[in-house]
Amino acid sequence: MANKPIVSKRIFGLPQKIATFRPGGERMTTVLIVVLALLAWEAGVRLSGAPVYLLPSPSAIGAWLWRYPWPLARAGTVTLVEALAGLVAGTLVGLTLALVLNFWSRLEQGVLSLALLIKATPIIAIAPILTIWLGFGPAPKIVVTALLTFFPVLINALTGFRAADPAILDVMRSLDASPGEIFVHVRWPSARPYLFAALKVVGPLAMIGAVVAEWVGASSGLGREMWLAYTNLNMPALFAAVFVLTLLSTMVYQVILWLERKWSFWRVGD
């Protein structure tokens, strides 16, 4: 019998795990796990007879969302805008500081010490002060979110700038490239994966920072809705607000993933 050609499990040099990847199957598995968890939660509450003011069932939370969708939608929009504004501000501050330290390394010890001091200060301690200074509007929430997000961006961007291939740097210098040209063509592409890694961490964190600031004092937002539900022992409303926060945080994370796929033009193969 003639020998049959052996078909490689690698397609055009792609690893097997990439060549056989089925995103639809993974999505179905994720949905199935979530559905089973919700069913187990519902059954546990009903069988244990837990009162609704201690642990509401998913059906009770869903009923609250069905009855009062617009207040939570408006509150979620306010929190999302505050979080995104703070995320953009924190990212710009972190990138700017990393850029300065990339060209003037003598400032590194002082700048990083100050940044670490700000990072180590608990946000819950800063939020009341900012609320007194800036009022109950969106400004203190944006500042809190920016303070919460700038440090990871600063560290990751600076690490990425310095992770550039030394051989490529030597070639660029041998061609008399200016520091600006080296930064644009070598250091910035090197820092891009590090930057997106930081954004995937601080993106959802920005939502949490905005909510924490709203707990201290706000006229609107998910934090205010949570505080009102907490003070009235309205657990379905509290869990519904947490659900909206989780949904928005996941959405922010997915948008960052989409931007990474769109703007990251190179990948390190396996």
Image (cartoon, rainbow, N blue to C red):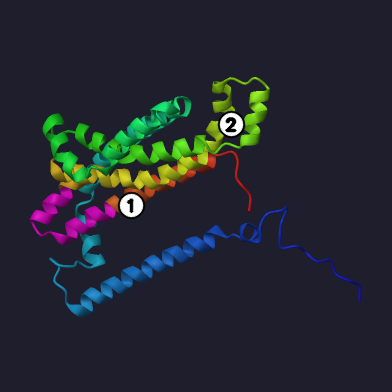
**Does the image show residue 256?**
yes
Give the side of residue 81 with respect to residue 91, left or right: left
Q: From the top left corner, tell me how far across and down residue 170 is, in percent.
A: 65, 30
The residue to which callout 2 is attached is 186
The residue to which callout 1 is attached is 247
Identify which residue, 262 or 187, lies in the foreground. 187
Q: Which residues lie in the magenta part? A: 225-244
Asked where in the image residue 234 lies, by quadrant, the reply is bottom left
Task: Tell me which numbered mark, 1 or 2, is placed earlier along the sequence.
Answer: 2
Count of marks, rendered view? 2
- Checking the image for residue 61, the label placed there is none
**Within the magenta stretch, is there residue 160?**
no
With respect to residue 181, does 263 lie above or below? below
Q: From the top left corner, tell me how far across and down residue 198 is, in percent.
A: 42, 43
Asked where in the image residue 96 lies, by quadrant, the reply is top left
Q: Secondary structure at mark 1?
A: helix
- Give the prevailing secondary structure in the magenta stretch: helix
**Within the magenta stretch, is there residue 243?**
yes
With respect to residue 170, does 145 lie above or below? below
Asked where in the image residue 181 lies, by quadrant, the reply is top right
How would you rate the neighbour count of disc 2 (Cα within 10 Å): few for under 14, some for 14-19, many for 20 or more? many
Q: From the top left corner, tell me how far across and down residue 69 is, in percent.
A: 23, 50
What residue is drawn where x is 44% and y is 63%? 30
